[in-house]
Image (cartoon, coloured by chain):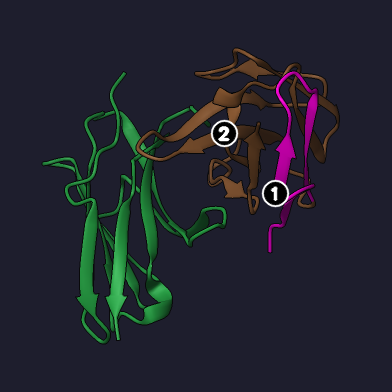
Chain colours: A green, B brown
Amino acid sequence: GESVGLHLPTLSVQEGDNSIINCAYSNSASDYFIWYKQESGKGPQFIIDIRSNMDKRQGQRVTVLLNKTVKHLSLQIAATQPGDSAVYFCAENIGGSYIPTFGRGTSLIVHP
Amino acid sequence: DVKVTQSSRYLVKRTGEKVFLECVQDMDHENMFWYRQDPGLGLRLIYFSYDVKMKEKGDIPEGYSVSREKKERFSLILESASTNQTSMYLCASSLGFITGGETQYFGPGTRLLVL
């Protein structure tokens, strides 16, 4: 089946910079997208979600952008902090399904 | 806040042993899931459940079984543990069949080592 992919497996940034993590999806029927953060040795933690009727959604220091034309999802983290160091996963849900497809993850490394 | 707990953070078992992994959620969620996570392979779905006593196979059910006798509890059973079942096991739950009910919330994971 189709799967969610990531452009960059590892992203290194300096503390205070803005980070952008990208995700490509291939299923045009997907209508719900989620970003998770997974710290070392822990389970994935929900960060933010977005539905296909939106192109942008903001949370605290995070913004998710959805470009349905090119099937692209991104997570922007403002003023990145060392505590943001983790693996970030995107996931997509096709309408009517409760089984998401997960991307492999991008490792974000924040240097103090 | 949703809380999903798993019975053990770390577990060491021997080949051939029967292994029980327990998961409990406290938000009255309908759906519960078991995944394993391996380096380079991402999250793979083992089994899931939409209701009490109901179970469905995921992508990699071989060597595993599950039990859901109560809504809040979903157990993963390795009938006869093998070394290739060494992995991180993650439980998740989601609310159910309503808009916004698809979001999965994960437990802290159980790192299982089979010797």
Q: Position of residue A88 (x, y in %)?
A: 37, 56
Question: Which of the labelled discs sits on residue A100, or is there none?
Answer: none
The span picked out in magenta is B1-25
* Label 2: element kind: strand
Which residue type does callout 1 highlight?
Answer: Tyr
Image position of B106 (left or right of A67) = right
Q: Is residue B93 visible?
A: no
Residue at the (37%, 80%) spot, across then down: A82
Sequence-earlier tag: 1 or 2: 1
* Label 1: element kind: strand
The residue wearing badge 2 is B35
Q: Position of residue A8 (x, y in %)?
A: 18, 52
Query: How would you rate the neighbour count of disc 2 (Cα within 10 Å): few for under 14, some for 14-19, many for 20 or more?
Result: many
Q: Position of residue A78 (x, y in %)?
A: 28, 79
Residue at the right extreme, as displayed: B69
Q: Is residue B32 magenta?
A: no
Query: Of residues B25 and B11, which is closer to you in this image?
Result: B11
Query: Of residues A80 and B88, which is closer to you in this image?
Result: B88
Residue at the (35%, 48%) spot, across then down: A90
- Residue A35 image-quadrant placement: bottom left
Q: Is residue A98 above or below residue B3?
A: above
Cα distance between the residues tagged 1 and 2 = 16 Å
